[in-house]
Amino acid sequence: MGVVAVDVLTATNDVDNHPVNDQMLTQVMATLVTTLRSHDLIIRYSNHEFLCVLSDLGASDADARCDVLRSVMNTGPATLVRVGVDQLRSEDSAEDLIARAATHSAAQEISSEALQHRSGHQ
């Protein structure tokens, strides 16, 4: 499972307006749909996070798929998304898996350009 954190969505909603945020959401979702496989499940989990259930992939293949997602979504100078990946363990609850993948996502650095956009300074 991958947790995709799009940090600028929260800032855009707070600083700009809802139509701008809706446009960004549409772009993010379109990118997820075109980058992931047709049978992967994409769920909006919070204001700025999406869960991507990558069924039938081992850990290394899921990492590779999420690396592609990172490169496609972070094409400009700003790192706009962080993607954390983890694999379901037999003892896991859904919350355990989501928390681990989100922790991996949170550990990634956000570029200074994204932080400036996040705080409303452009």
Image (cartoon, grey):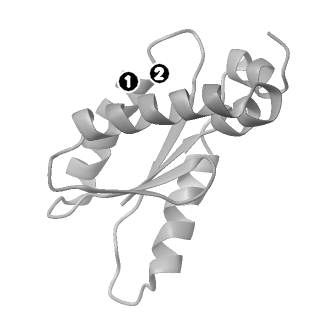
- From the image, which quarter does the C terminus lie in? top right
Pointer 2 with pointer 1, Cβ within 8 A: yes
Residue extending furthest toward the bottom: 91
Category of crowding for the residue at label 1, using alpha-carbon neighbours closer than 10 angstroms: few (below 14), some (14–19), many (at least 20): few
Residue type pointed to by label 1: Ser
Q: Residue at position x 43%, y 28% from top?
A: 27
Tell me the number on the disc at residue 28.
Answer: none
Q: Please tell me whether residue 118 is drawn above or below residue 60 in the rendered image.
A: above
Q: Please tell me whether residue 72 is drawn above or below residue 10 in the rendered image.
A: above
Residue bearing the label numbered 1: 71
Picture coordinates of residue 100 (x, y %)? 53, 66
Q: Residue at position x 56%, y 58% from top?
A: 102
Residue 53 image-quadrant placement:
bottom left
Category of crowding for the residue at label 2, using alpha-carbon neighbours closer than 10 angstroms: few (below 14), some (14–19), many (at least 20): some
Residue type pointed to by label 2: Asn
Depth order, front residue of 38/63 = 38
Helix, strand or loop at disc 1? helix
Depth order, front residue of 102/35 = 35
Residue bearing the label numbered 2: 74
Picture coordinates of residue 25 (x, y %)? 51, 36
Q: Residue at position x 22%, y 55% from top?
A: 40
Depth order, front residue of 73/99 = 73
